[in-house]
Image (cartoon, rainbow, N blue to C red):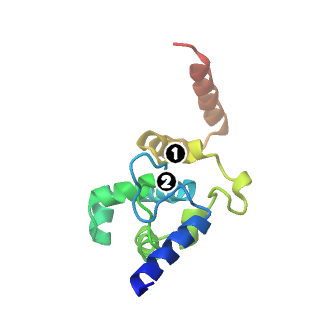
Amino acid sequence: MMAGQVRSASKRAAQLDSPFKSASIGSMKAGDLPNPIDTHVGLRTRLRRKMLGMSLEELAAVLGVSYQQVQKYEKGVNRVSASRLQHIARVLKVPESYFFEGAPGGAGFAAQPSAYVNAFVASNDGLTLVKAFTTIKNRKLRRSIVNLVEEIAAEKF
């Protein structure tokens, strides 16, 4: 067996032994689902970027990639390398561990918000709502707003 064949065989063996058998290395193939950890890291990236008021284009420019590449990172379609994640963390002013807080299968995962909560907070409306809601100091008023939203959500349209 030649050196190139040995490397290819080793790579294939590593992929088969990987806990992420369904995910491909690099970018995904059509029909593949993103790995839950890749999706989580992407959601956390999007959330922090939006919290800082940074656009896709701004983050992409600093990272030296296209905005489409940043979109793929945020959706978990393309995996983020360790060096790229470190760069993103520096740009977004968070430790690398920030991206894994509450990740599926991680320590303390059960105590973290559900994926739908993270996805909502990472959305434009979710982040705007959270920012506005947290500025309301009156506890009774905040409780009234929660009650109102629960009543609206309970109605069938």
Q: Is residue 148 visible?
A: yes
Task: In the rendered structure, find residue 138 and report the number of the disc placed on it.
Answer: none
Vertical order, 39 against 19 (above or below)? above
| In this picture, residue 109 sits left or right of residue 154 | right
| In this picture, residue 108 sits left or right of residue 91 | right
Which image quadrant is residue 117 in? top right
Which image quadrant is residue 107 in? bottom right
Q: Nearer the viewer, residue 48 or 142?
A: 48
Q: Residue at x 45, y 65 (%)?
A: 25
| In this picture, residue 107 sits left or right of residue 91 | right
Q: Residue at x 49, y 41 (%)?
A: 126
Where residue 97 appears, as percent x and y from the top left, is: 58, 70
Instruction: Name which of mark 2 and mark 1 comes first in the sequence.
Output: 2
Task: In the rendered structure, find residue 43 and report the number of the disc placed on it.
Answer: 2
Where residue 3 appears, as percent x and y from the top left, is: 42, 86
Q: Residue at x 59, y 24 (%)?
A: 148
Q: Secondary structure at mark 2?
A: helix
Marks 2/1: CA–CA distance: 7 Å
- Residue picked out by circle 1: 119
Which image quadrant is residue 103 in? bottom right
Q: Nearer the viewer, residue 66 or 148?
A: 66
User: In the rendered structure, which amino acid carries the disc numbered 1?
Assistant: Ala
Q: Residue at x 55, y 71 (%)?
A: 13
Where residue 7 appears, as percent x and y from the top left, is: 45, 80
Q: Nearer the viewer, residue 95 or 25?
A: 25
Estimate how packed mark 1 is, as few (under 14), some (14 to 19) or many (20 or more) residues with alpha carbons within 10 Å.
some
Asked whether disc 2 touches disc 1, contact meaning CB atoms under 8 Å apart, the reply is yes
Tell which residue pokes out farthest to the front in this image.
1
Q: Is residue 53 visible?
A: no
Tell which residue pokes out farthest to the bottom in this image.
3
Q: Secondary structure at mark 1?
A: helix
Estimate how packed mark 2 is, as few (under 14), some (14 to 19) or many (20 or more) residues with alpha carbons within 10 Å.
many
